[in-house]
Image: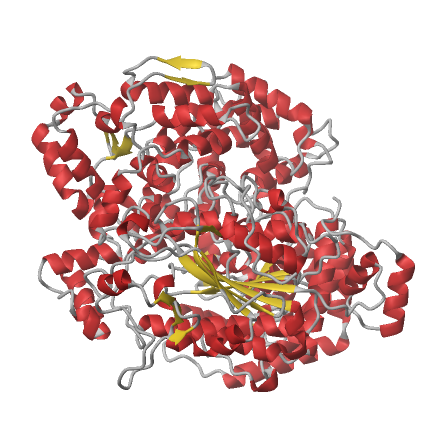
Amino acid sequence: MKKAVKYWCGFVMLLCLFTVFTAFLPGYPNASLKFPYKQAGLTPEQAAAHLLSRFTYGATPGEVEEVSKIGPEKWFAQQLDAQLPDDSLNQLLNKYDALKLSNTEVVAQYPKGAQVLRMAVRDGIVNKDSVKTDRKAYRDQLQNYMQQNGLKPEQELLRQFINQKILRAAYSNNQLQEVMTSFWFNHFNVSIVKNDCSQYIPAYERDVIRPNALGKFNDLLLATAKSPAMLYYLDNFSSSGNKENMEQGPIRRRLMQQMQGADTGRFANMPKLNKAKKAQGLNENYAREVMELHTLGVDGGYTQQDVTQAAKVLTGWSVYPMGTYGQAGQKLMNRIGDEKLQSRGFVHEGDFLFNPNKHDSGEKTVLGHHFAAGGGYEEGVQLLDMLAHQRATARFIAKKIAVRFVSDNPPQSLIDKMVHTFMNKDGDIKQVLITMVDAPEFWSAAALREKTKSPFELAIGSVRSLHADITQPYQLFNWINKMGEKMYYYQAPTGFPDKGQYWINTGALLNRMNFGLALASGRIPGVKVDLAALNNHHEPESAQAALMTYCKIIMPGRKLDETIKRLTPMLNDPKLMEKVGEASAKTLAATALPVTASDEMMDQQAGLKGKRKNNFIAMQSTSGNNSMLAQVVGVIIGSPEYQRR
Amino acid sequence: MVSRRGFLKSGGLALLGVGLLGGIPGFLAEAAASEKILSPYKKKKTLVCIFQRGAMDGLMAVTPFTDDYLKAARPNLFMSAAKSGTGNPLIDLDGRFGLHPAMKAFEPMFREKRLGIVHGIGSPNNTRSHFDAQDYMESGTPFNKGTSSGWLNRAVGLLGHDALTPFTAVSMTSAMPRSFYGDNPSVAISNLQDFAIQMRGNPAGANIAAKSFEDLYDQTASGLLKQTGKESFEAMKMLQKTDIKNYTPANGAVYPSSALGNSLKQIAQLIKMDVGLEVAFAESNGWDTHFNQGTENGIFARNVADLSNSIMALWTDLGTYQDDVTIMTMTEFGRTVHQNGTGGTDHGRASCNFILGNDVSGGLVYGDVKPLAVENLEDGRDLAVTTDFRSVFSSVADKHLAINNDHILFPDWKGDRVNVMRG
């Protein structure tokens, strides 16, 4: 009961804040804007439901009415502005101490296994040869060493990072910003699977993607190009010009040696290999993907010659030395001083370092644009700017956004409008989104519920639909993984494909159904659902009434006749309650009561006592809620209708 | 939305099939109908691929034991083919190469010419990064990161028929491997028992829910969800008919109780259920032996024992299905010729791989392993890659699965095949 009151207070406060904020809205979109949903035959409520299905991770109970009351245009403007307060979310995130760390701090506090070993050997704590004799003793030694030095395993960093994403997606009031953050992360994908870049991924999302998610495309592209995560993921950090074209500065040789030391991770114990890597020279990986995947698209009209030339332009774009391996390089840098470095053509901005000694200083031509010799860092910035403003880029990005927000096969007429805005508004992402929502194609019947939810969208959407209380976000990550979307682990730079066919296969589909059942019946540890509170503790009059009520709460603004019709026989099966009752009785008997009487336990017992007669809500056990209601809600979450948005 | 699978091409045939045999899952009937084959239980050829993640030391698995350079470079790791003392020597395959003694299970297959080995195999891209090398090998495009599909997924698209079932391509992994990325239907599942509607502690509830789900998916307007839902429930029911949990392997086969053993056991079950499995994928981990690699005992020996015993258990278990199955291993690169300072080996270039089956032209160590003199080594340190992995993979795909469209299977590759298969 207390819980419900808390929810209500939160609700009312939120509503108040909404009202206050809407009074001081800046000019996005302009006041005259009127989304053309009425022309498409949609009621304000249906329009709100569609809008929420596209720009949030799912409507929370009551949200459709709220948005239709505020007006879809106003709501969208708030979301574009992304300034709604998120106090309760921030409170939840506060307990994750790793989320605020800079890359330098992360590297220092969450070193990789090989790094820890080197440090321990260096400090004389672990004898290298002990590896050979006693593995367990060696592991214990390492663990002690880590504890004493305040070092933590990298896995812990990644766990906190994944948890924060789940909490933000589930609870942030600035939903569009979160959705766009996912969109751009996937567009500029980097992967935890690649050991070299995994440590830098939390800061990549936080400092590179999220702040630019609703900004200018050009800024976003440049920020990704300079980030350690991308520099390591697509190997540009190691790319260097031909010897004859490299600057021969006085500190070049020393620096080359030191800089290679900044390459952390698994090559650490292989000095010979580092030598081999040094000799590699030009690496085209980033240059190719920046054109194929980030800007122009595979049919964007560039040649292999353009790729090679662009790679040369971007030589020397590297990472400022950090961590234990970077210590020597850092010392050297400090000794020389930023000022002197600058005068020699170095550029040091945060984690980014342009190293002119690795840069190919010759002339280059990319897509017909000529770069004169000696362009240094600036020619790379110009190259990215030029790529960001190509029409091919506008087409590629506009289509990708339309696929994400409208349908797997968006109409060309819509894409054309978005391309026009992209070109005329300097790649302003907000303006492109406004153009999309302002187009009739966005509201057409062909677009409604045409998208299939990804596993992440399904999991977060369900949590939002049921107002679930998440205390262990990682449990949801495990389910999302099981349903086929191991977030942040997608290996290829393409990112996850954005189409229904990719997500829906037999194994994944069954797991979606199982997820619905597990969530609704309280069998996902650390994810608590209070089904009675969803309906303000009004007991449904009958099984049929419950079905109608909960379908409407979970899937607002939709025609649900078929779903309800198909689920009705399940409720009317006379043997059904008996069967479920028997099963739950067995489970109850088999489960010993936990020793500690947590709030959760008290709630459940109260529920049992108060509503024993009502099979719909009762029959909660410590191992899950076996009530008919949980069953119904689980089936709704796993139903085909709920897989669509 | 059009379903990604071919729909019934010949209604009459399908009806006949179902009518005659009754209770056949629709996807099999459909598959049969579209292939114009009366019996849906027509056996399919299956290719089982095993990825050894971490880079196997090919020089220890199959050692050129007459090479003095190798002996000098590996004072603590080199093994001999000559019997000495109590230890087990290498298994002399051909007077030049010796099989690691922990892989003795492979020996009969090699002698019977049903096991082929390719040595000096690897990628033309000389990266020594696990990530990059695996990525390139699995996408099949060693110089292009942006290839969205994996080579095995493209293989599914080239099978030459659209009679795909939910089990045409199965990866026994929790997440989809890079090899399986792509548009053609494929499934990643680490445990076949997960192929069910489940509610822990409430099986009755799960049954009721399953029935409701089936009804709901049957009526949905979304073609994709409807079709996949139908197949899911059919597949589920079929698996329920067999007792997956208490499966007893045939012919006294004993699978190691390892992750790989467990994966291959489940692949055997799928093959024997005739559910249309054509491309199977499993993983073997722990090959990154920088430390204390061991010789006839130790980490490496345990790994190769697990690999060979798991594969041989699958082979034995298959029994009469052996003719339809080819098993192929792969690993991202090999390891340094020289041992390192911690009793292990570091990242190198070429390794070796194993291809096993009745249509393999076995009993041979294929490839071109030059004497390990400095001038023959890649970058002066590693066993040189003399066989592009694609020249072997394409040969196996062609002869076993009748896939001969190399420019789709391996775009940008124009090399020659190394024919390791009969015929």
Colour pattern of the rendering: secondary structure
Q: Quadrant of the N terminus of chain B?
A: top right
Quarter where residue A532 is shown:
bottom right
Seen from the viewer's position, the closer of residues B85 and A111 is B85
Give me the residue at 18% from left, 24% from top.
A248
Residue B111 percent location from the top left of the image: 52, 75
Q: Relative to A38, is A463 on the left or the right?
A: left
From the viewer's perspective, is residue A497 above or below residue A312? below
Total labels drawn: 0
Seen from the viewer's position, the closer of residues A162 and B355 is B355
Residue A134 percent location from the top left of the image: 20, 75
From the viewer's perspective, is residue A383 above or below residue B19? above
Quarter where residue A414 is shown:
top right
Q: Relative to B106, is A238 on the left or the right?
A: left
Q: Residue furthest front?
A: B95
Give me the residue at 55% from left, 71% from top.
B113
Seen from the viewer's position, the closer of residues A186 and B104 is B104
Q: Relative to B250, is B41 on the left or the right?
A: right
Q: Relative to A201, is B263 on the left or the right?
A: right
Residue A340 percent location from the top left of the image: 12, 22
Q: Quadrant of the C terminus of chain B?
A: bottom right
Q: In the rendered image, is residue B92 in sight?
A: yes
Give me the residue at 21% from left, 45% from top.
A105
Residue A57 percent location from the top left of the image: 53, 45
From the viewer's perspective, is residue B117 above or below residue A52? below
Q: In the rendered image, is residue A20 in sight?
A: no
